[in-house]
Image: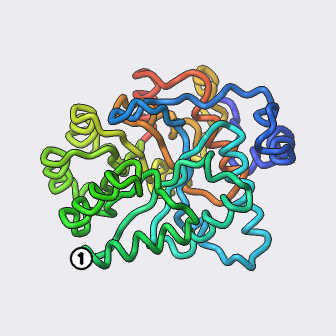
């Protein structure tokens, strides 16, 4: 075993600082890094980068907080510089939608972003009002992906979303959940409804979705976004107390977060993983999981044995 770099050590890497200092849209902004891998959205064939960013907590900041605003801007700059695009938010994430909209406008990057958000309320009219408000905050005429959050009033909202998709207000529709307690209902929805996307919790220490949900999504031609890939944080905090294993180099990984993200991406049903962060250096670390050698069964088995 070698002493691998932790996130704290990664912050000191000169390459990270150099990348952040460059224009996010210049041809050399990726510092010669491989482009992010892409996977197809089954409903359309559109290719989506495999690493995105979630905005829970990290983007729930005040517009007057200059340091936090600058950090979130750098997160998006790093994402776009790597060829990434997926940004996931929600009305329940405080000011995150407004921050995303402001930053995309500031960066003139709306065309580069694949923006996903959610509807999370009861009733058709309340749902419409909430989604319209999200569009105003995000400063977008069309949302790439609108999701029914945690299946709240999903029948009502999916009816609206199908109409909105026909009208061109959204490009894709889907549903989300973040805990296995909702999997029974989620399975019924996957079997009965035509969906473009599913967002689900999946991590090394949270593999319940492997039993029914992920195979069913693949069978039904539904793209999968993975949330909580670090096990809600507890798993990552535990692993960061240990050295990164020597064999991580075989998979072009230099940190525990990269190993955990590649674990999630090793499942054939997964389209994109969206770890949440407002830290630009963590974003750079996460992006490395979308490059280099992909995880195989041997790597999965090694990681599982660590639990």
Is residue 178 shown to the viewer in this render? no
Within the image, what quadrant is residue 271 found in?
top left
Residue at x 27%, y 63% (from the top left corner)? 160
Residue at x 35%, y 55% (from the top left corner)? 167
Q: Say left or right for 270 vs 121.
A: right
Is residue 298 shown to the viewer in this render? yes
Q: Position of residue 29 (x, y in %)?
A: 79, 36
Q: As rendered, which of 241 and 142 lies closer to the eye? A: 142
Q: Residue furthest front?
A: 167
Q: Say left or right for 134 vs 155.
A: right
Q: Position of residue 293 (x, y in %)?
A: 57, 21
Q: Position of residue 263 (x, y in %)?
A: 46, 34
Mark 1: give few (<14), some (14-19) or many (20+) Cα within 10 Å.
some
Dividing the image into 4 quarters, which one contains the N terminus?
Answer: top right
Dividing the image into 4 quarters, which one contains the C terminus?
Answer: top left
Residue annotated with mark 1? 123
Q: Position of residue 240 (x, y in %)?
A: 60, 48
């Amino acid at each position: 075993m070698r002493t691998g770099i932790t996130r704290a050590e990664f912050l000191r890497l000169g390459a990270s600082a150099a990348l952040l200092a460059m224009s996010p849209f210049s041809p050399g902004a990726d510092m010669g890094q491989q482009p992010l891998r892409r996977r197809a959205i089954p409903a359309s064939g559109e290719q989506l980068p495999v690493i995105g960013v979630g905005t829970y907590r990290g983007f729930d900041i005040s517009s007057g907080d200059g340091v936090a605003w600058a950090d979130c801007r750098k997160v998006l700059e790093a994402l776009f510089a790597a060829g990434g695009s997926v940004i996931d938010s929600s009305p329940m994430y405080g000011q995150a939608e407004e921050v995303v909209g402001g930053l995309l406008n500031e960066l003139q990057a709306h065309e580069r972003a694949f923006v996903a958000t959610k509807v999370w309320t009861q009733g058709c009219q309340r749902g419409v009002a909430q989604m319209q408000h999200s569009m105003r905050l995000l400063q977008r005429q069309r949302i790439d992906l609108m999701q029914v959050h945690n299946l709240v009033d999903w029948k009502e909202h999916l009816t609206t979303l199908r109409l909105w998709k026909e009208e061109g207000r959204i490009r894709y529709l889907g549903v989300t959940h973040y805990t296995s307690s909702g999997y029974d209902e989620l399975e019924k929805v996957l079997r009965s409804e035509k969906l473009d996307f599913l967002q689900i919790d999946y991590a090394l220490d949270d593999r319940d979705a492997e039993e029914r949900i992920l195979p069913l999504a693949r069978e039904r031609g539904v793209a999968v976004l993975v949330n909580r890939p670090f096990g809600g944080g507890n798993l990552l905090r535990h692993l960061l107390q240990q050295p990164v294993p020597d064999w991580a180099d075989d998979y072009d990984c230099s940190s525990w977060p990269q190993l955990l993200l590649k674990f999630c991406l090793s499942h054939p049903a997964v389209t994109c993983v969206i770890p949440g962060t407002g830290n630009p250096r963590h974003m750079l670390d996460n992006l490395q999981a979308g490059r280099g050698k992909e995880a195989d069964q041997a790597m999965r088995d090694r990681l599982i044995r660590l639990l």
